[in-house]
Image: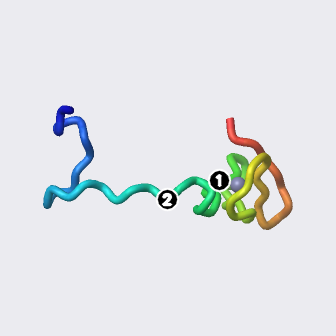
Amino acid sequence: MNDRTRGTLKDGKPWPELPAAQDVDCDGENPTTSCRCVLGHHRGRHRDSSGAEWLDD
Ligand SMILES: [Zn+2]
């Protein structure tokens, strides 16, 4: 394995593992209003605080 292709921090430690997708809140952003999704982790449509829903492309 070629270490140059692996992500490492400046001190040589590997990047921390990303948490599993189901453990993180949704970071969706309404493309029309730029409001953040308020649903937390979920599947399907996003929704912002105004009740607007959208889907990722
Ligand atoms: Zn969402």
Residue 39 - label:
none
Q: Which of 36 and 18 is in front in this view?
A: 18
- Measured in 3D between alpha carbons, the distance from the residue under mark 2 to the one under mark 1, in whole angstroms, is 17 Å
Name the residue rendered at 66%, 55% in the picture. Answer: 34
The residue tagged with tag 1: helix, strand or loop? Answer: loop
Direction from residue 41 to residue 12 in the image, left or right = left
Q: Ligand 1 within 8 A of label 2's CB?
A: no
Residue identifier under label 2? 19
Q: Nearer the viewer, residue 6 or 45?
A: 6
Name the residue rendered at 54%, 55% in the picture. Answer: 20
The residue type indicated by label 2 comes to: Pro
The residue type indicated by label 1 comes to: Gly
Name the residue rendered at 76%, 52% in the picture. Answer: 46
Residue identifier under label 1? 28
Direction from residue 21 to residue 13 in the image, left or right = left
Number of on-image labels: 2
Q: Ligand 1 within 8 A of label 1's CB?
A: yes
Dot 2 or dot 1: first in sequence order is 2
Indicate the position of residue 32 as horizontal and vertical percent values. 72, 48
The residue tagged with tag 2: helix, strand or loop? Answer: loop
Residue extending farthest left: 11
Indicate the position of residue 35 as horizontal and vertical percent values. 69, 60
Direction from residue 17 to residue 10 in the image, left or right = left
